[in-house]
Image: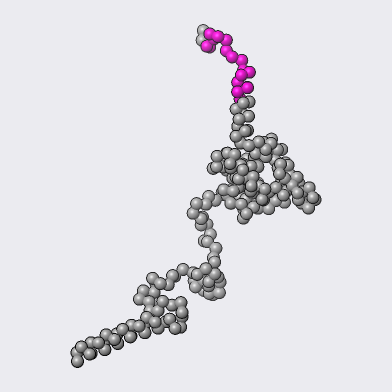
Amino acid sequence: MKKTKTIFLTLGVAITASILFNACVKENPDSPGFEYMPDMYRSPSVETNGKNPWNSKNDSMGNMLPPEGTIPVGFTPFPYPNTPQGDTMASMYWKSPIPHSDSIEDKGKFLFTRFCIYCHGAAGDGQGPLVSSGKYGAQPPNYADLYKKGWLTDGHIYWVITYGIRNMGSHAGQVSPEERWQIIQYVQRLGRGGKAWSAWQADLAAMQTATDSTKPKPAAGNNGTK
């Protein structure tokens, strides 16, 4: 008799447990059933494109802007404002963290061809297809002229790409900070006549050697002492 009661009791417990674990499944096919620790199953985060439960009106999507003043991990903010003074400060103090090289210039050339060539031209002379066709009313500057004047600094070009200038709009949304540095190196290359960095450095070294060879040498035995 006791054995029979035990069997029925065990069976009853098993059936009850089965009902409890499957109670929610019929109403919600996505439910795991009875949840012993709901927080382990249900994420408290807002679902992508879902409603925001922390909004008092509960009528906005969950895709919210980050809190004001926060900076993404690994991102370096540009500290200079969109003002003439900001341009001047950037020109003086904002320097490229990427060493100059032919490979970086080649990456900059690829980006320049995608975003800049239509107005600035392949040679950087401001005679791109849009300008020469008359569809773009303004005249972009000639990089060679800017280079001679010393205006093609890292910071100035970065400032222009970030904010835009005159008829040129901002390209901050299209070009990442790293890509801006690559474009800057290629723009400077166009400004010095299109010669690659390695070739330009070789020319500078040759010029320095030639200059040193023409300097008068001190007479033999004259070491500046009496």
Magenta-span inclusion, residue 167: no
User: Looking at the image, which residue is at 70% across and 40% down?
Assistant: 143
Q: Quadrant of residue 145?
A: top right
Total tally of numbered discs in the picture: 0
* Magenta-drawn segment: 208-224
Of residues 200 and 6, which is closer to you in this image? Answer: 6
Query: Does residue 87 appear in the picture of this structure?
Result: no
Which residue is outermost to the bottom? 1
Expressed as whole percent of the image width and height from the top left, the position of residue 32 reads 41, 76
User: Looking at the image, which residue is at 53% across and 59% down?
Assistant: 68
Expressed as whole percent of the image width and height from the top left, the position of residue 8 reads 26, 89
Q: Could you tell whether 200 is left or right of 140 in the image? A: left
- The image shows residue 99, relative to residue 59, as above or below, that is above
- The image shows residue 152, relative to residue 171, as above or below, that is above
Colour theme:
one colour
Query: Does residue 60 appear in the picture of this structure?
Result: yes
- The image shows residue 191, relative to residue 26, as above or below, that is above
Magenta-span inclusion, residue 218: yes
Q: Could you tell whether 226 is left or right of 150 in the image? A: left
Of residues 158 and 199, which is closer to you in this image? Answer: 199
Which residue is outermost to the left? 2
Quarter that holds the N terminus: bottom left
